[in-house]
Image: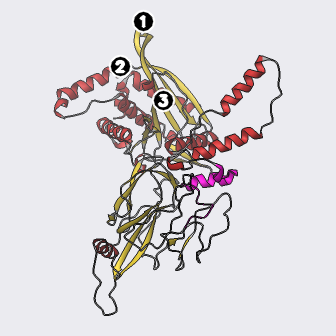
Amino acid sequence: MAPGLNVNSLEFKLPDLGEGLTEAEITRWLVRVGDVVAVDQPVVEVETAKAMVEVPCPYGGVVTALFAEEGSELPVGAALLTVAVGAPAGDDTGAPAPEEPADRALQTAAAEESGNVLVGYGTAAAPARRRRVRAAGVVANGAPKPAAPAVRERPSQGEPSQGSPSQDAPQPEPGRPVRPQEPVTAPSLAASPATRTQPADGPIPVISPLVRKLARENGVELRELTGTGPDGLILRADVEAAMAAARTAAQPAAPVTSTSTATQAVAAVAAAASGDRYPLTGIRGLVADKMARSRREIPEATCWVDADATELLAARAAMNAAVKDGGVEDGGGQKISLLALFARISVAALARYPMLNSTVDMEAREVVRLADVHLGFAAQTERGLVVPVVRNADKRTTESVNAELIRLTESARDGKLTPGELTGGTFTLNNYGVFGVDGSTPIINHPEAAMLGVGRIVPKPWVHQGELAVRHVVQLSLTFDHRVCDGGTAGGFLRFVADCVEQPAVLLRGV
């Protein structure tokens, strides 16, 4: 690097991605150490509990360090990477210093400033000093530090003394795979003096701060663990396995009996203790938290009814035949789905029973009846259950609702739904009939007040116009918040939905 270039190293932290998300998993780095990045260029792809997001960096310059590996989880506010930005400085004679390609990139980046921000970070002026990281186990004067405690925190960052530059990296202990905790800096950005030897207690091969926190809170000695990750990296599963082993060792031994029943019971307990464990993270963790909160806070009740859907199927077939005649093969329209018809029926029922389109404010002890209907629908994807939201469903036509359902479903399957498309629902439609089941008692999507469930439509014996006939029957269920309404309102809502299913012409009364 040219001697006339003043370099500042800026640390970019994982921003708040909104909607109460507290952590994200690094799925793919879009840059490497030494790459030149522009202002607002996406640098990493992360997976939150709700969607895949490309995170742009608000600084322009040269990437000097990456702080996490692909597949690791980081909390909001944790360091993602550092970017070196700089400005030219003349020598004592006033002549500008010669430039290298990386220097020109730094100079250009120094004059730029991002105008785009995510929640939780902005593009304020760069700090006056470059922050560096001391090598683990070495103090400022070069003498080895005393042995560190069993559970060690990430070394603090600060301005090093002349004898401890940030590029010093401890060497791994012979026979022990060690992954340096500190990032590798770009060799072109600073001179690297002679490398010091690693202290006897070299760094613990742990990258994730969540793993360190879990070990610290449960008294797990990280130095006694053998990591199962790449190059001996200690993973969260390793810490949880150590915790399980400690709990098993702390349990009193069961008395030895001669009966086969006791032997079988002991074997069953041992098998259960050694079973596989799966962390509740990402979308699975979000669903778990939300469903648990719903059950804790909402006194829900469910009512259901069977309905003859034969006429609804006939109406759908007639609608799609009309669309086909209008040129659906030429892109003139889309076939109407049953879900779109049930969405249209739900909106009509909410117009008659608006108390079910509400939420409860317990702090104010009020029921808030909402003016607009934002209709959520449950969609099963490879990443788990998600609930996309059709905005202003009460102001859309059946064709418009159908088109939006198709768009959101495709985005959900591709994992491209935005946080805004997954939040803000006021009423949920759950078509569990696609799984081949007749009925269910679903948990309300907190903080909504009700959910309509639709089972499979199957041919069944049914009394039609005084005679026994084979008709297409569907079971409908309504789960509702008993704080919002009583059974009379819920029953009236469900009965109206059933009437519309049995006689679709009922919908024309409100047109």
Q: Position of residue 399 (x, y in %)?
A: 29, 36
Q: Is any part of residue 108 visible from this angle?
A: yes
Which quarter of the figure is the C terminus placed in?
top left
Which label sits on residue 467? 1
Whichever of callouts 1 and 3 sits on the residue coming sooner in the sequence is 3
Residue extent of the magenta highlight:
197-224
Pick out the residue farthest to the front.
174
Q: Amino acid at mark 3?
A: Gly
Which label sits on residue 453? 3
Residue 166 higher or lower than 489, as above or below = below
Which label sits on residue 311? 2
Q: Amino acid at mark 1?
A: Glu
Q: Is any part of residue 363 visible from this angle?
A: no
Q: CA distance from mark 2 to mark 3?
A: 19 Å
Q: Secondary structure at mark 2?
A: helix
Q: Nearer the viewer, mark 2 or mark 3?
A: 3
Whichever of callouts 1 and 2 sits on the residue coming sooner in the sequence is 2
Specify the quadrant of the image occupied by residue 292.
Answer: top right
